[in-house]
Amino acid sequence: MIFSDKTVIFGQDVDMNGLLRPSVLLAKLEDAGSKQMEAFPPSNDDLRVRGMGFVISRLLLRIDRPLREGEVADARTFATDSRGVSYNRCYQMYAGDELVAEAYSSWALLNFVEHKLVRVGEIEQLGGESEPPLRLDMPMREPFPPVDAFETLGTREVYFSDADINGHLNNTKYLNWLCDCVPDILHKTLRTANISFVTEAPLGERLTVLRAAQGDRFFFKLQRADGRLCCEAILGF
């Protein structure tokens, strides 16, 4: 069941080039997913009352054309084939009849009370009837450069403005952090993102940013203070 949510691109949504920030694009797509769950409960708030919540594990994002300030767009989303402990959801963004972006995401549903993952089928269907998954023409997993190809750029702390209601770095904020670490970003436009979320980054955590480059593709690793991997990402421009 495809759910549609009209959205407007405001001035605060765009970057110095007047283009919609990828993090805001992702936030608008995920907002549509939350609204679909409100329309076909349980919603995210309902799950939170029951001691449960979703945590993203994988994101594939392709941007065909950045939106600009003043454009009216249509964020579309639907739940798709899910199994085991993976709850999968797809997104599309349209400007009129033009498809400008697509995304595929995989989520885990955590029971915070019992400290366990909730398997598909152990809870009622979420977000309406599922649809076949999108084919983004992007590999789900790619080999990374060797360890010695990565340079350490520095560290960055998770501040209050970065954190979501669970007290962790919000998944949409990762795109801000990563794009900030791309050389000459003012003259680049993000086209693809493949992010694997490994462990959450809580408020106050200091992450080390490592980067390797292959042409217009940038490979990132974010590591927690104890050395654990927080996420791996590939950005294409």
Image (tube, grey):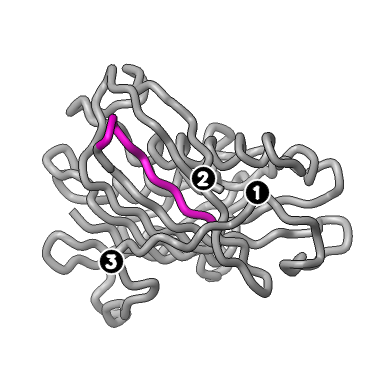
Residue underneath mark 3: 137
**As drawn, 188 above or below 200:** above
What element does badge 2 sit on? Answer: loop
Towards the viewer: 180 or 148: 180
Residue underneath mark 1: 128
Residue at point 31%, 80% (across, down): 143
Q: Main secondary structure of the magenta part?
A: strand
Callout 1: 10 Å neighbours few (<14), some, many (20+)? Answer: some
Could you say where residue 196 lies in the image, as x and y percent from the top left?
46, 65
Residue at point 39%, 45% (across, down): 92
Could you say where residue 118 lies in the image, as x and y percent from the top left?
77, 65
Quarter of the view holding residue 16: top left
What element does badge 3 sit on? Answer: loop
**As drawn, 77 above or below 226:** above
Q: Is residue 153 magenta?
A: no
Is residue 105 something one can see in this rendering?
yes
Q: CA distance from mark 3 to mark 1?
A: 26 Å
Residue underneath mark 2: 2
